[in-house]
Amino acid sequence: MKKFVVYILKCADGLYYVGLTGNMELRIEEHQSGYFEGAYTSKRLPVELVYQCYFQTYSEAFSKERQIKKWSRAKKEALINGEIEKLPNLAKKNFKK
């Protein structure tokens, strides 16, 4: 059964890119080579793979990709660092008065 990968790349400028693919090796090559001219990562090379998670179905992977894309930088970094216990607190809004 084909597996789908949700991944996070750290770009040369320190920003994160979240993506989804069915072929991780090929997708990394495409990012590193700037294959998609004008794409987000093509202007931020080189990129480094810092996180990947596998899913059995495209729909599961797509849902997770969309979820992570909405996360703050702090929450993405907690995921990357394996600090899963921090994720619930990072989801809470801090409203300052």
Image (cartoon, rainbow, N blue to C red):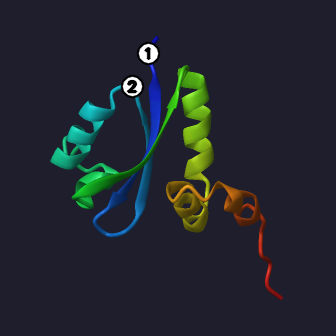
- Whether residue 31 is situated above or below residue 72 in the rendered picture: above
Residue, far left: 33
Q: Secondary structure at mark 2?
A: loop
User: How far across and down, in percent of the image, does residue 84 sit?
Assistant: 65, 54
Image location (x, y in percent) of residue 22: 39, 25
Seen at 42% across and 59% down, the residue is 16
| Circle number at residue 83 | none
Mark 2 surroundings: few (<14), some (14-19) or many (≥20) residues within 10 A: some
Give the quarter of the image for residue 62: top right
Q: Is residue 32 left or right of residue 70?
A: left
Residue type highlighted by circle 2: Gly
Q: Left or right? Give the position of 27 relative to 82.
A: left
User: Quick check: 91 above or below 54?
Assistant: below
Q: Does 38 appear above or below 75?
A: above
Residue at position x 40%, y 65% from top?
15
Question: Residue 23, percent across and down?
Answer: 33, 27
Which residue of the protein is positioned furthest toward the bottom in this rendering? Answer: 97
Q: Are marks 2 and 1 in contact (CB under 8 Å)?
A: yes
**Element type at mark 1:** loop
Q: Nearer the viewer, residue 40 or 86?
A: 86
Bin the neighbour count of mark 1 within 10 Å (Cα to Cα): few under 14, some 14-19, many 20 and up.
Answer: few
Q: As rendered, which of 54 and 11 lies closer to the eye?
A: 54
**Sequence order check: which comes first, mark 2 or mark 1?**
1
Q: Which residue was labeled with disc 1?
A: 2
Q: Residue at x 22, y 58 (%)?
A: 46
Residue at the spot x=55%, y=55% of the render? Answer: 82
- Farthest top residue? 1
The numbered disc on residue 22 is 2
Measure the alpha-carbon separation of dots 2 and 1: 7 Å
User: Disc 1 marks which amino acid?
Assistant: Lys
